[in-house]
Amino acid sequence: MLIKTILNSIEKFQSFVYGRSAFEVVASVKSLVIELSARKSTRGQCVQCGRRCPTYDTQAVRLYQYVPLWNIPVYFAYAPRRVSCKLHGIHVEPLPWAEGKERLTKSYQLFLATWAKRLSWRDTAKVFNASWDSVYRSIQWVVNYGLAHRAWDNVKQIGVDEIAVFKGHRYLTCVYQLDKGCRRLLWYGKDRTAKTLLRFFREFGKVRCAQLQFVCSDMWAAYLKVIKKKCVNALNVLDRFHIAKKFNEAVDEVRREEVRKFKADGEDNVLAQGRWLLLKKPTNLTQKQTSKLSELLKVNLMSVKAYLMKEDFQRFWSYKSPAWADKFLEDWATRTMQSNLVPMKKVAKMLRSHKTLILNWFKAKGELSSGPVEGLNNKAKLTIRKAYGFKTLNCLQIALYHQLGKLKEPPSTHRFC
Ligand SMILES: [Zn+2]
């Protein structure tokens, strides 16, 4: 079977035909070069109005990289025409297989971008012998297409979250859609100020804001203020995931302080490697970790006390009625305030001051699950962790949309992967 036959069956162009294919050395690598030419009796299009216009001249042959075949680089070779449009002057004709001046074909770009969802960008480049920049440009093209064709209708539930980037020096505000069946990253903005979130709501529009039923968020005051102002019909819920985070931070603070004391007093550090035992959900511990934890809990330590307080609070989430949950929260806070653990007292104060929003969880019960925010947050963090090689914030943002945006892909006639 001829290469031409395969190409015609997967990617046929209306006004262009495949010609001869032969091995040639391109950039010191033996490659397969396939000639393309314009179908006889067709004229090139004007890039601006799309009208078929007379040819002004023909440029030198250019190579457009295509999806590799059996690890052999493949190129299309074509000499683009310059056409003369009465209205728009002389321009190079647009080509169906490549965008503008891009030397990578659309199929190859989509191919690289699809693999870059599964592999890191660097590995994608390595595996397919592409440059890092080719991978980056491919993803950027796919993401830009997706953003231009994105639909924001029927969004009923959103989550607002912040993530630290570049070793915590900077933050991104992420807005997720949390509706069942469509959980994705809707938007992100630099920083985590009120202005950042206001920018999202301005883009989102008044009508869509009014349709929102639930907004999940953490306790960041700037966010709470904006949500209250903009989402007048929605119930603002402080979600479990963010509250659990506060608890873990407090337990960890107690533990660190205690370890410091052990060191200062020259005592054995019984808490060595105890960090994960105290912070992980008990159900996520291995058998060995569980037995280690039960050993640890027998020791009279501040960290153990803090851990038990944290675990005790978990009962809060099993209440059905907001009134009983309220009572439990108050009792728990009172007990905690009588302890001498400052970080835990801080948590108690925080829970009390945000009680109304926390209790909204029970009003929304059944409608809202706490999983998605945590899941999306973890995915975003993973994307950032895999981000070695991302040189700028801009790269990182493209990566986040690419991984979490569920964006529409450019149309193609064949799926390569
Ligand atoms: Zn024109």
Image (spheres, rainbow, N blue to C red):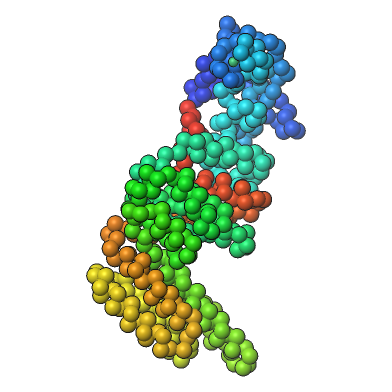
Asked whether residue 314 is in view, the answer is yes
* Residue 361 screen position, x and y as percent: 32, 64
Q: In this view, does 323 lie above or below 340?
A: above
Asked whether residue 295 is in view, the answer is no
In the image, is 149 to the left or to the right of 62? left
* Residue 204 screen position, x and y as percent: 44, 45
Rendered residue at 52%/16% (across/down):
14
In the image, is 214 to the left or to the right of 201? left
Rendered residue at 70%/20% (across/down):
61
Q: Is residue 187 above or below residue 36?
A: below
Q: Is residue 231 above or below residue 330?
A: above
* Residue 152 screen position, x and y as percent: 41, 42
User: Which of 394 and 293 lies nearest the eye of the viewer?
Assistant: 394
Where on the picture, by quarter, is residue 286? bottom left
Rendered residue at 36%/62% (across/down):
237
User: Which of 73 and 201 lies nearest the eye of the viewer?
Assistant: 201
User: Which of 112 and 211 lies nearest the eye of the viewer?
Assistant: 211
Q: How many marks?
A: 0
Where on the picture, by quarter, is residue 101? top right
In the image, is 352 to the left or to the right of 279? left
> Ligand 1 sits in which quadrant?
top right
Rendered residue at 72%/33% (across/down):
29
Farthest-out residue, top? 41
Farthest-out residue, front? 229
* Residue 224 screen position, x and y as percent: 44, 62
